[in-house]
Image (spheres, rainbow, N blue to C red):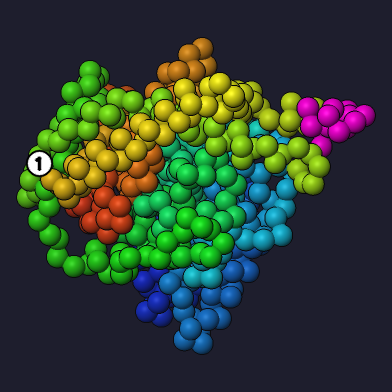
Amino acid sequence: MHPLRAPGRALGKTASLIRQHQETIEDQCAVGIDRIIADVEANRNLNAYITETPDVARSQAAASDRRIREGRARGLDGVPIAIKDNYCTKGIRTTAGSKILSNFVPTYESFVSGKARDAGAACLGKTNMDEFGFGSSTENSFFGPTINPRGLELGRNNVAPGGSSGGAAAAVAARLCLGALATDTGGSIRQPAAFCGVVGMKPTYGLCSRWGIIAYGSSLDQAGAIARTVDDAAILIDAVLGEDPNDATSVRTPFANIEAFLAKPSAQYTIGIPRTIRDLNSNSDLENCWLIGESVIKDAGYRIRYVDLPSLNYALPAYYVIALSEASSNLARYDGVRYGYRSPRASNISELYENTRAEGFNWETKKRIIMGTFALSAGYYEAYYERACRVRRLISDEFRSAFRQVDCLIWPTTPTPAFAFGSHQTDPISMYLEDIFTVPVNLAGLPAISVPIALAANYLPMGLQVIGPQFGDPHVFRIAKEVQNRAGQIGFTETSGLRK
């Protein structure tokens, strides 16, 4: 049996059995902690993890087992998860995929990873990512690229897993964890989830605290989850939602438990399709994704209505101006003075700053800092940053108008299936265009989930996004679950290995 096809179990099933005392941690180790630790070690060729923490996972599992025996079980007891390496984890190296933080060990825990830990999750390790989240392929990591396990199953070891959360998506797809915490600034959860044939959820901005997450673009970053099923993603999101006084953008959760909401009978929904995206010149893979998506929506009994979102044409340039401007500001803190890499070649403070940043950042990071600094500079601030912010408000207004006509929106997660490493090196704009379907959601701060829906001509998966209004996360999950169930009925689930 191929190691990536080893028997596995969904996160929700594992957690449920433990809660019901039908299994102890030891009883489920064959498909849980010890088995997955062995799989992680056996599949290091994927480079999904930067730092493996088997001892931490075993210790946390032992604590879970004690609670279970004492009748104090928590929601994620015994569930092995991975954490993207831009979450600060107390006592565990946190690098953000960069040289400049390659030996950084935080003395504090991020709010979201702390919530997962307190719920009983066992941390298997920190997953690979594009440096500081700057990329869509996980090629831009100081620790080397992650290989897409879906490509590897087809005999291809050169397929990118997407980014920047490529390590997290690859780990979930390869069953090297039952779920993963990740972040999404412009599609960094949803795009790699689509490329790896798994589920990726970005909640409404503010529902998950950003405190303790290494910042890329503060007004865009949002914590979220990657899992094999919609139900599993709901379990993870439920565990980490919550208002945090340390994050001024954090909000109180305005709805009840999502997992319980999914157990209720499905409602009737009107699903919107933006003409702006549907009418784009598409390739055959994208058109197939559209056709299957529309078909499963109709089969679910939902109504389809076309809506107008004309300003989505300007979303990509507006996003990159805002994101890179905020990145330029956020990354100013890495100067070699207090923590992180420090250049040994410096005779004064100016040389220390210059050499540390020149040696510690990779080319993609330096390029984005330069572009962001330019957009914020005197004489250009109004022409670029302020104009991008005006476009952002216009896009948000159009989304609000659309959601007065429909309950949720759908469109493909990516314009193409996963690509080969190096495909976009000679044309960086083509790499940025990979984000064209994901960035509008971040600009408007909306919830969105990617669900695997189709196989491309090259047999790699493609995803469909379900996008909801602000705080419409439970309905996004419900529609996504229906989509996933019906995609399974036409055979995709078996092909992707999301269930056994």
Q: State yes or no: residue 355 in magenta.
A: no
Give x and y (percent) for residue 350: 83, 29
Please indicate whether residue 416 sits to the left or right of residue 221 in the image.
left
Please indicate, yes or no, whether residue 197 appears anywhere in the rendered image. no
Q: Is residue 89 above or below residue 315?
A: below
Residue 305 shows in this picture: yes
| The quarter of the displayed image where residue 42 is located | top right
> 260 above or below 174?
below
At 40% from the left edge and 69% from the top edge, which residue is drawn?
A: 15
Q: Nearer the viewer, residue 87 or 440?
A: 440
In the image, residue 331 lies at what x, y percent?
64, 37
Question: Residue drawn at (16%, 48%), measured in percent from left and top?
Answer: 404
Is residue 175 shown left or right of residue 52?
left
Instruction: Tell me the residue that label 1 is attached to.
Output: 304
Residue type highlighted by circle 1:
Ile
Q: Residue furthest bottom?
A: 70
Q: Is residue 344 above or below residue 218?
A: above
Residue visible at 24% across and 45% down?
A: 400
Residue range of the region highlighted in magenta in the rendering? 342-354
